[in-house]
Amino acid sequence: MTPVQLRAARLILNMTQGDLAVAAEVSRATINRYESGVPVGAGQVRLMRFAIEAAGAVFIPDGTTVDGVVVFGGVGMRSPPAAARPDEGTGQ
């Protein structure tokens, strides 16, 4: 997981650095440093990745083809369970 992928995943999930810090049990400063491109420990990167994946992020390996498009540096989000999705008929 690159710093850019972490930031993209966090934004897709509408998480602040503080939210991720709590979930990953690392400091917000660690997340800020990593997203800024400053090296942090491999263990801290693992904790951040586990937390962001537990929140629903999916990292798509480079070279994966999705609907005819080759993905590089991809980040996505798992769909929520059907019960958690808004009702399509009411717009809620």
Image (cartoon, helix red, strand yellow):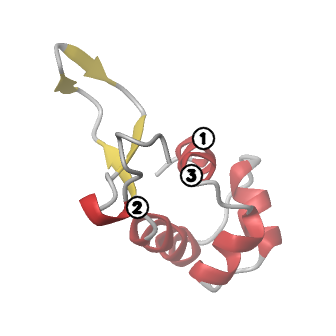
Amino acid type at circle 1 is: Val
Q: Residue at the location (60% across, 72% down)?
A: 41
Give left or right: position of 33 versus 84: right
Vertical order, 50 against 63 (above or below):
below
- Disc 3 marks which amino acid? Leu
Q: Are marks 2 and 3 in contact (CB under 8 Å)?
A: no
Residue 34 in picture, x, y percent from top left: 69, 57
The residue beneath circle 2 is: 56
Residue 16 image-quadrant placement: bottom right
Earlier-in-chain disc, 2 versus 1: 1
**What amino acid is labelled 2 in the image?**
Gly
How far apart marks 1 and 3 lie (CA) works out to: 5 Å
Give the residue at x 55% y 46%: 12
In the rendered structure, the answer to whether residue 26 lies left or right of residue 59 reads right
Query: What secondary structure is marked by label 2?
Result: loop
Q: Are marks 1 and 3 in contact (CB under 8 Å)?
A: yes
Q: Earlier in the sequence, mark 2 or mark 3?
A: 3
- For the view shown, which residue lies furthest in the right direction? 29
Q: CA distance from mark 2 to mark 3?
A: 12 Å
Residue at the location (34% across, 58% down)?
80
Q: CA distance from mark 2 to mark 1?
A: 17 Å
Task: Give me the disc on residue 4.
Answer: 1
Binning the other alpha carbons within 10 Å of mark 1 as few (below 14), some (14 to 19) or many (20 upward) gives: some
SS of the residue under disc 3: helix
Q: Which residue is mark 3?
A: 6
